[in-house]
Amino acid sequence: MNKVLAFLLEKKKIIIILFIILILLLIYFVGFSKTRDYGKIYSIEKVYENGDISYEDLKSLAYYQNNGINNNEDILDNNYEPQGIGSLNLFHKYQLKATLSNKFIEYYQMNIDYYGTYNDYIAFTFTLPNVASTEVIVDINIGNLNFVASNPSKLIRLYKV
């Protein structure tokens, strides 16, 4: 009888230890802080050069960046159909805002514009309230496609999910 009781007590300790480890892992991955860094933000150029998005993805991003085929008429014609944007799910939106809030401002104050997901990269731009920005035209060429924005904050960025 003592061997059975000792065995059960030993298993109970293991179960308690595993439960504590599980709780600690949940705390680590979920986190209590709204500024937890969920992912990394990259430029379109970096992701394309690494081969993480295709040339077709790049053409869609150029289309959305320039509000149509503007600045890329030699590559994109009037019949060009970019990848559909869809919608950003709530979980990924929270992750993205939490990551951005680490760098800029409280996440609930920013506005995110979503431009689709490309091979596990979320394409977005964001604006911050009450922040004056000067008009500085940015023109970047990636894969012979032009990406034009009225200032650097308006360039599409990619967030790795």
Image (cartoon, rainbow, N blue to C red):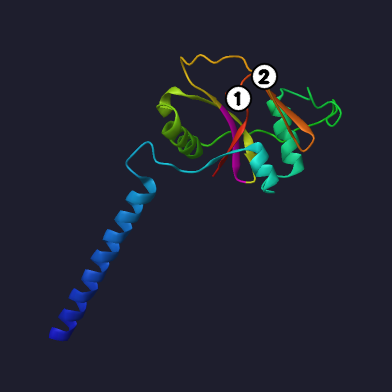
Q: Is residue 65 left or right of residue 98?
A: right
User: Quadrant of residue 143 in the image?
Assistant: top right
What mark, if any, has residue 63 been given in the picture? none
Between 104 and 129, which is closer to the camera in this rendering? 104
**Amino acid beneath label 2:** Ile
User: Of label 1 and label 2, which has the lower sequence position?
Assistant: 2
Real-space Cα separation, disc 1 to disc 2, in angstroms = 8 Å
Q: Is residue 3 left or right of residue 35?
A: left
Q: Residue at x 51, y 14 (%)?
A: 132
Q: Is residue 142 left or right of residue 25?
A: right
Point out residue 129 in the picture as x, y percentages from the top left corner: 47, 17
Element on which disc 2 rests: loop
Q: Which residue is mark 1?
A: 152
Quarter that holds the N terminus: bottom left
Q: Is residue 65 left or right of residue 12?
A: right
Q: Which residue is mark 2?
A: 137
Point out residue 11 in the picture as x, y percentages from the top left corner: 24, 74
Point out residue 128 in the picture as x, y percentages from the top left corner: 48, 21
Q: Bounds of the magenta span?
A: 120-125
Q: Is residue 1 visible?
A: no
**Amino acid beneath label 1:** Pro
Element on which disc 1 rests: helix
Q: Is residue 22 magenta?
A: no
Q: Residues within 10 Å of mark 1 (few under 14, many from 20)?
A: some
